[in-house]
Image (spheres, rainbow, N blue to C red):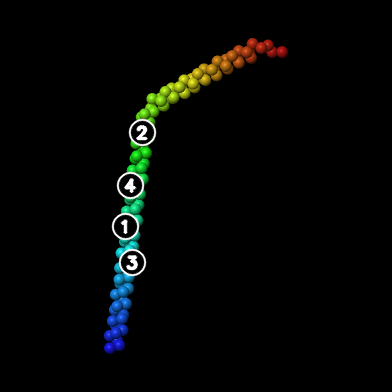
Amino acid sequence: MQSEIINDILSVEDDANLIIQQAQKKANNILTEAETRAAKMMKDDLKAERDKNQQAFDILLKEHKKEIEAYQLKLESQIKDEGSLIDTLSTQLANNICKESVY
């Protein structure tokens, strides 16, 4: 009789250990699945936000394209004017140096 009771206790203990192992495995699977879903949601949200920002940038760029082009032309003109001013000043400086008499 004692051996039967001991066998029953051991059997219950084995069953309890099995239940614990299954519960741990199930918990790990649930956590892994939740992490995977969370990572996908974050990736999708980031992509959506990036797309939204890109669209806003494209709209602003389109709206201000003429202003940007006008500013670029103005800068190019200023660079050209500065280049010709430098040429003029250097020529005048060279002429003035050549005109001075050497003692």
Direction from residue 71 to residue 22 in the image, left or right = left
Q: Mark 1 points at which residue?
A: 33
- Check whether the beta carbons of the residues at disc 1 and disc 4 lie within 8 A of each other: no
Camera-side residue of 34 and 91: 34
**What residue type is disc 2 on?**
Asp
Could you give the CA–CA distance between mark 1 and mark 4, rounded to whole angstroms? 16 Å
Percent of width and height locating residue 21:
32, 69
Percent of width and height locating residue 50:
36, 41
> Residue visible at 39% across and 28% down?
64
**Relative height, residue 47 to residue 27 (above, below):** above
Q: Residue 58 carries which label?
A: 2
Q: Mark 4 points at which residue?
A: 44
Q: Mark 3 points at which residue?
A: 24
**Relative height, residue 11 to residue 54 (above, below):** below
Judged from the image, the secondary structure of the residue bearing numbered disc 4 is helix
Disc with the residue nearer the chain's start (4 vs 3): 3
**Relative height, residue 80 to residue 27 (above, below):** above
**What residue type is disc 3 on?**
Gln
Could you give the CA–CA distance between mark 4 and mark 3, rounded to whole angstroms? 30 Å
